[in-house]
Structure formats: structure tokens, C-alpha cells
Amino acid sequence: MVRLAAASLAGTAIEFYDFFVYGTAAALVLGPLFFPTFSPLAGTLAAFGTFGAGFVARPLGSVLFGHIGDRHGRRPVLVASLLLTGASTVAVGCLPSYGTIGVAAPVLLLVLRFLQGLGLGGEWGGAVLLTAEHAPPGRRALWSSFPQIGPAVGFLLANGVMLALSASLSEAQFAQWGWRVPFWAAGALALSGLWLRSSLPESPRFLELDNHARVPIVEVVRHHWRLVLLTAGALAVGYAVFYAVTTWSLAYGTDRLGVSRTVMLVCIMAAVVVKGSLTPVMALLGDRYGRRPLCLAGCTASALWMFPMVALLATGEPLLMFLGFTGALISFIAMFSVVAAYLPELYEPRVRCTGAAVGYNLGGVLGGALTPIVATALAEHSGRVPWAVGTYLTAIALLSLGCFALLPETRPMPVKAAEPVTGDPVTR
């Protein structure tokens, strides 16, 4: 389990590094480089639009790689998705700007971002299922939480590199070539991830199956469509909160508040460290008290904290911004520490890779793809404190709260010593 959890964590960290480094670049430099004919606001919105294209691709990646995972095994998904995401990320770093190749630059940027999202859409399902289906039922949330630490590690890697480059290079150097370095580094990270995953065993639950779904997505749509929609709506708030903190607030703080890029990155990164550290702690609570109670508590906390968060952000004071970001990310991780166990338990094994991943990534479209764009547009017409952004995020939290309320609990119940343990908790 330690080896599996470590390999899953490392792989998700690498893939989310690829995904996050784009989000940071979109907030800082991609607008002027690839959309120079736009106004500053329109350029930022256009850059966030290409950022959103990755989220739109993620459910399609879930269908593609979910088919592989449900038909041929979870392990092949991990290799193929990592290769696709790594290659497309390196290609972004090599892409000429608008000034060199004209309109082809933003078009190619959009295509590469789409391919990034396609790979990441498959990554989560493969990594989480391989860990969850090996884990003992009583500690499934704990072991499954390690891939959920990967996004925090990937974010810190991506922004740590960006922060170092931003601090050591001039504005002109950073805009000319410095921003490309983190994208080039993705190639070495992808190779190391492939080496780590090369010896992982296949999931025992997949090997036990003798009746594989012929076309998993058809079966999911036909028999589990309500569950997919509920899980997507439930997870939307997590994505909205996370990308409001890590992407929109970075652009808002630097553009509207005049806070230095370095200060904003440090505040956000410090809050992400807290979030990553608390992930296994929250997962242990999920194993003890259930997945659904933690998700309901996280949604409620998010709904209550969004207005304080935007008020603290608007101060421009580093300590207060850190406090606002930390409160939001603790609410977020209360939910997302257990979803890696919760979603697989909701779906039957024969379509689990497709169903869990599609629900998870549709939540990303609802919450992650739109939040930076909508929040940027709302903040432009707000005063010093962007209350409209707080209202938008609170509304998403209430929507997710309602969806979680309609989902069942799946935590395995304690089994008496004389009673044999067979099957999955969702079917026992």
C-alpha cells in the first residue's frame, strides 16, 4: 500500500503540475503574449478561456481513458495519460507567441491545453482506483487520499518554479523566456513518473471481474446518469473554491490590488501547504465518521466563508489574504480528502473507472472552468471588495450542498469477526 500510494501521489503531482503551471502562466503572462490585440481585461479573459478548455476536455478524457480502465485495466491508464499530459505541456513551452506566428499561436495554445485536459481526465480515475481497490475497507479513505495530496504537491512545484523565476528574472526576461522553463521541466517529471509506475500491480477488483462492460460510457449514461449529475454538482464547489484561490485571486491581486506577484504566490502557496498537510487527517475522519458527513460539513463551511475570503483578499495584506485562502482550502479539503474513496464506492466495479472519473471531471467543468472567467468579469464591475464574486461562490456551495444531501453514505460498516468480508461496500 505504501508503494502504491507513493506512486499514485507522485503521478498525480506530476500531472497536476502540468495542469497548474498553465493556470499560473494564464494569470501572469499568456494574455499579452498570445492575445496582444486585446485589452488587458479581454486578454486575461481570453487566457482564462484557454485555461477552461482543459476542463472541457477532462470529461472526454474520462470517457476515453475510462473505457481503457474498465475494459483493459487501471494500470494502462496511468501510463497513457501521463505521456499525453507531459508531451502537450512541453509543447506549450516551445510554442511561438502571437508576435512570431500570428493567429496560429492562440489556436495551437488552445489545442495543446485541450490535450492537457484530455490526459488529466484519465489520470485521476486510474490513480485513485488503483489505490482504492487495493486498500482495506476500513482505511480506504486514508490510502485513497494520497493521490489527492498530489494536486497540492503539483501546485507547489509549479508555483515554486514560477516564483523562483519571477524573483530572479526581470519582467522582460520572464515574459520573453522565463515562463517557458516550468513547461520544459514537465518532460523530465513525466519520465520520472513513468519509471515510478512501471512496476505497479493491476487492481485486484479489476482482475476479479469476469463480465466487463462492452461500452462503459453507454452503461453509465443508461443506468447511472442521475448519479453522474449529482456527483458533478456536488464536486463543483471544490473546484470553484480551489481555482478562485489559486488562479483568479492571483490575477486579481496583481492586476487590481497592485500586490506583487511574489507576495501573491507566497500567500497562496502557504495556504496550499496547510491544505496538503491536512488531507490525510481529514481522510481519517472520513474513515471513522463517513464520507457524506465530511462533504456536507465542507460545503457548509465553504458557503459561510466565501464572503470573508473576498473581504480578506481585498485588503491586500499578506497575512489577512493567507488567512482567507487557508479557510477556503480547509473547507475544500474536508470534501476532497474523501472523494477518492467516495466516488469509486458509489459505482459498481464494471463501470467504476468511467463513472467515477466522468462525475469528477464534469464537476471540474462546472466549478473550475468557469470560475476564473466569471470571477474576473464580476470583479471588474465591483468596488474595492468583489462581493459579487463572494455571492457567485456561495451560490455554487449551496448547489453542491444540495447534491451531497441527495447522495447516500458508502462507508463500509464494521464487520463481525465471524462474518466473512466479501464484495464491495456498495454491493454488500
Image (cartoon, grey):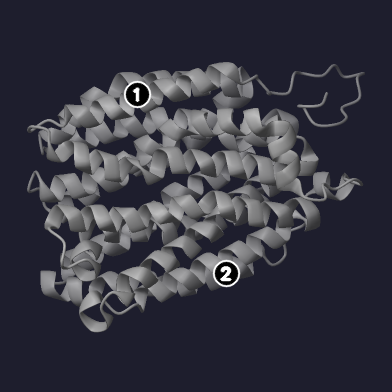
Where residue 358 appears, as percent x and y from the top left, is 60, 43
Query: To which residue does mark 1 refer?
Result: 395
Where residue 268 appears, as percent x and y from the top left, is 27, 44
Query: To which residue does mark 2 refer?
Result: 83
At x 51%, y 24%, the residue is: 295
**Can I make out residue 245 in this image?**
no
**Can I make out residue 131 in this image?**
yes
Name the quadrant containing residue 219: top right
At x 32%, y 29%, the residue is: 393
Q: Residues within 10 Å of mark 2 (few under 14, many from 20)?
A: some
Q: Which mark is residue 283?
A: none
What amino acid is labelled 1 in the image?
Ala
Q: Residues within 10 Å of mark 1 (few under 14, many from 20)?
A: some
Name the side, left or right, on which 69 lies relative to 207.
Answer: left
Name the quadrant containing residue 146: top right
| C-alpha span from label 1 to label 2 | 37 Å
Label 1 SS: helix
Q: Is residue 243 above or below residue 180?
A: above
Residue 68 or 98: which is nearer the viewer? 98
Where residue 413 appears, as percent x and y from the top left, is 74, 18
Badge 1 or badge 2: first in the primary sequence: 2
